Image (cartoon, coloured by chain):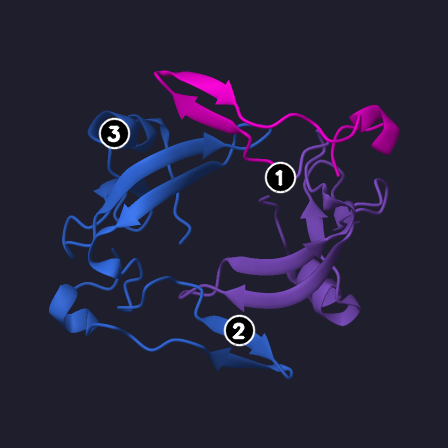
Chain colours: A purple, B blue
Amino acid sequence: MLAWMNAESLACTIDEGRAAYWSRSRQRLWRKGEESGNEQKLKELRVDCDADTVLLKVEQIGGIACHTGRRHCFYTRLANGGWEVTEQPLRDPAAMYGRDDD
Amino acid sequence: MLAWMNAESLACTIDEGRAAYWSRSRQRLWRKGEESGNEQKLKELRVDCDADTVLLKVEQIGGIACHTGRRHCFYTRLANGGWEVTEQPLRDPAAMYGRDDD
């Protein structure tokens, strides 16, 4: 998955050892899994060569990172000039939360 | 590595089967490796659940994706409250190009 961070969410991630992001839609700190339970336990934190991208290696609690109920968000693949869905949800999003992002 | 794309670079990537990005510093289409030779041959292209992030799986020609001469850009790891460099350059950046991004 890809999400946004600001200084607060980066500090929170490091302090608490779990992924926190900056929710642009909610305009607030977003501890991943705070609603869905799909928390991400921090295993390693890296930054890129110009230090403006953060890479988190995590243990994905519940095995679901995507708000659609899939393991990850990149389940749509370009194939033969169209888009192919490569994975089906493991869990019904409605069972995870009422809103559509987490 | 992480880089930016726009519609033109996405179309170019698909049409040519090699990674192209939008260079914010140069404000133009940037075919990865056009100066360094470190091209990225497209193996697979995916988008995320809300279709605003593109994931490229590539064959990294030359084995170097980072402008610092490393295999990848995420060679700086948080360790014991400080930053640790986990990989050394495989090639001298000055031998790859005169400018500091590609």
Sequence order check: which comes first, mark 3 or mark 2?
3
Q: Looking at the picture, does residue B67 appear above or below residue A84?
A: below
Above or below for B28 versus A92: below
Tag 1: Cα neighbours inside 10 Å, few (<14), some, or many (≥20)?
some
Kind of residue at disc 1: His
Element class at badge 2 = strand
| Residue appearing at x 79%, y 27% in the figure | A93
- Judging by the rendered image, the residue that carries numbered circle 1 is A72
Q: Which residues are magenta?
A: A73-102
Q: Does residue B28 appear in the picture of this structure?
A: no
Q: Amino acid at mark 2?
A: Arg
Q: Residue beneath label 2, please?
A: B77
Q: Which secondary structure, mark 1?
A: loop
Pointers 3 and 2 within a single chain: yes
Placement of the C terminus of chain A among the 4 image quadrants: top right
The tally of labels here is 3
Does the magenta portion include B37? no
